[in-house]
Amino acid sequence: MKERKTKQLITMVVVLAMLMTMTTTAFATGVAPTTAVTGTTDVTIGALAIANSAAVSLDGKTKTITFAVTDMTITDARGTGAGWGVSLYASQFTNATASNGAINTLPASSLKLGTVAIAIDGTSPDSSSIDTITLGQGTIDTDTAAGVRILSAAINGGMGIYTASIGDMTLTLLPKDSKAGTYTSTITMTLTQGPTA
């Protein structure tokens, strides 16, 4: 009787050991799910919109004219972390209707940017920190066609959606340079798709 119980106990131990082995093997099997993530081709930015200024009357003193700039949305959904940059360049203001038969051109560096700012768009709160984007200032009607770099996203920065804003631009009219008439400038915005200096 004792021998029979011993055999039963040995059999139970062997069966239990086999079950434990089988269970361990089953849980050791792994699964590796994958997914493909694609990005857009380019960084995008909204159109540059600048309002005309109010008319100004010359009175022999220096005048300052302001131009309001509409906010712009910048989206980097490329998924590359390559960085990007935005530059502004303005041609010198010219007055084709100036008196005495000559086109009047205002001196370079007469048009100054307002404060440039960047904020993460509310629709994309998990965008890269704004600390990864450098802001620029200055006059944009310079002799350098490259203009002024107003925004520079670093490598692995600037990924997501942002709102860029520029305070009112100011145009300075010095009495010695200004003739009556209509002044016009062409402002060009350039978006660089890769690393920026």
Image (cartoon, rainbow, N blue to C red):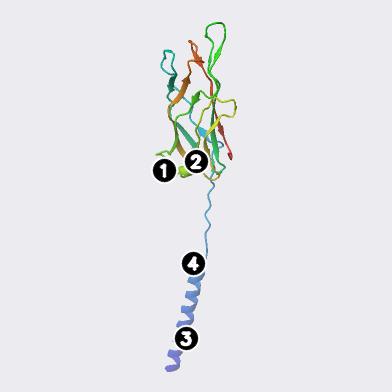
Looking at the rendered image, the quarter that the N terminus falls into is: bottom left
Q: Are marks 1 and 4 in contact (CB under 8 Å)?
A: no
Q: Are marks 1 and 2 in contact (CB under 8 Å)?
A: no
Q: Amino acid at mark 1?
A: Pro
Which one is in front in this view, the residue at disc 3 or the one at disc 4?
Answer: 4
Looking at the rendered image, the quarter that the C terminus falls into is: top right
- Calculate the distance from the C-alpha at mark 1 to the C-alpha at mark 4: 39 Å
Q: Nearer the viewer, residue 50 or 47?
A: 50
- Calculate the distance from the C-alpha at mark 4 to the C-alpha at mark 2: 47 Å
Q: Amino acid at mark 3?
A: Ile
**Which one is earlier in the sequence, the residue at label 1 or at label 2?**
1
Which one is in front in this view, the residue at disc 1 or the one at disc 4?
Answer: 1
Q: Amino acid at mark 4?
A: Phe
Residue annotated with mark 1: 125
Residue annotated with mark 3: 10
Q: Nearer the viewer, residue 188 or 30?
A: 188
Q: Secondary structure at mark 1?
A: loop
Q: Position of residue 137 (x, y in %)?
A: 49, 33
**Which one is earlier in the sequence, the residue at label 3 or at label 4?**
3
**Which one is earlier in the sequence, the residue at label 4 or at label 2?**
4
Is residue 158 something one can see in this rendering? Answer: no
Residue annotated with mark 4: 27
Q: Residues within 10 Å of mark 3 (few under 14, many from 20)?
A: few
- Calculate the distance from the C-alpha at mark 1 to the C-alpha at mark 2: 16 Å
**Which one is earlier in the sequence, the residue at label 1 or at label 4?**
4
Q: Residues within 10 Å of mark 4 (few under 14, many from 20)?
A: few
Q: Secondary structure at mark 3?
A: helix
Which one is in front in this view, the residue at disc 4 or the one at disc 2?
Answer: 2
Task: Report the residue at 47% width, 86% height from top.
Answer: 10
